[in-house]
């Protein structure tokens, strides 16, 4: 079933509004993204399965419920997805990390893969795919295509911003993958940038042009 999870928590929306401003420095942009990704991690993991474990409190032995963080994989799409990673790991420090290297061909706008590295035993793992922007959807579709060859238990896609074109592209090819986002913007401009958007997330994270 097609799923869009729009994270509207006031703190998420407040920090996103600050990030959108063109006057925000590179340092402040990184800090806000770290804080925002931590907040989003709580929503993304809301329905993760729990299992019972035996623990010992100061008073007695009992059972408690925990997620298996080692079965979770955060997979940032390089390079901008790295900006999401540390905040997510603050919430689930036991998660494994995979990396997907893609760049957008400036002529065709298609995704070109240059790196792919995932943990072992992916069929036992839940993947959270990270990329701040879901614009044309080409990179997201290419990443999901590649991940599905490893048959993970589940895949979730997380972005700061998206638009109707990006959602349609991903769910046209992968309707089973839920999309978590803090905002659904108006659409794409003539250069396939999200508008009103926040500019190029990678450039703003790393201070490049």
Image: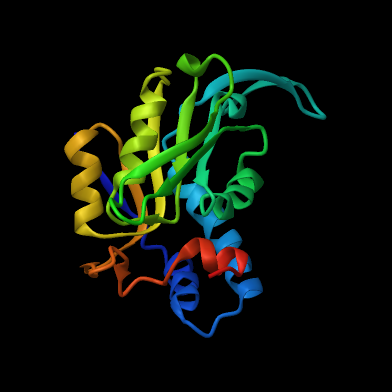
Placement of the N terminus among the 4 image quadrants:
top left
Q: Where in the figure is residue 100, as x and y percent of width and height?
A: 50, 37
Residue placed at 27% from the left, 53% from the top?
Answer: 136
Residue placed at 25% from the left, 52% from the top?
Answer: 166
Taking 146 as reference, is 93 above or below it?
Answer: below
Taking 169 as reference, is 162 left or right? right
Residue closest to the far right = 58
Q: Where in the figure is residue 15, as x and y percent of width and height?
A: 50, 71
Taking 150 as reference, is 113 above or below it?
Answer: below
Residue closest to the far front = 107
- The total of numbered circles placed on residues is 0
Residue placed at 59% from the left, 23% from the top?
Answer: 119
Colour scheme of the picture? rainbow
Taking 170 as reference, is 79 above or below it?
Answer: below
Q: In the image shown, does 165 or 94 lie closer to the viewer?
A: 165
Residue closest to the far bottom = 23
Q: In the image shown, does 65 or 72 lie closer to the viewer?
A: 72
Choose top left, top right, bottom left or bottom right for residue 10.
bottom left
Taking 59 as reference, is 33 left or right? left
Residue placed at 59% from the left, 48% from the top?
Answer: 85
Taking 60 as reference, is 35 left or right? left
Taking 139 as reference, is 12 above or below it?
Answer: below
Q: Where in the figure is residue 109, as x and y percent of width and height?
A: 30, 52
Q: Where in the figure is residue 209, as x and y percent of width and height?
A: 53, 70
């Amino acid at each position: 079933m097609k799923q869009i999870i729009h994270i509207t928590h006031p703190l998420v929306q407040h920090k996103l509004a600050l990030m959108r401003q063109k006057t925000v420095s590179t340092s402040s942009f990184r800090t806000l993204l770290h804080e925002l990704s931590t907040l989003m991690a709580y929503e993304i993991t809301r329905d993760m399965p729990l299992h019972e474990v035996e623990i010992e409190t100061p008073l007695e032995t009992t059972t408690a419920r925990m997620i298996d963080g080692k079965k979770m994989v955060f997979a940032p799409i390089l390079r901008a997805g790295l900006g999401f990673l540390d905040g997510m790991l603050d919430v689930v420090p036991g998660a494994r990390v995979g990396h997907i290297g893609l760049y957008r061909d400036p002529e065709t706008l298609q995704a070109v893969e240059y790196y792919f590295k995932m943990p072992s035993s992916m069929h036992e793992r839940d993947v959270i795919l990270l990329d701040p922007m879901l614009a044309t959807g080409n990179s997201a579709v290419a990443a999901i295509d590649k991940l599905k060859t490893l048959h993970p238990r589940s895949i979730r896609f997380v972005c700061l911003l998206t638009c109707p074109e990006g959602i349609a592209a991903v769910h046209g090819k992968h309707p089973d993958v839920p999309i978590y986002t803090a905002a659904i913007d108006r659409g794409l401009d003539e250069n396939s940038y999200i508008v009103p958007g926040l500019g190029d997330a990678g450039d703003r994270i790393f201070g490049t042009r």
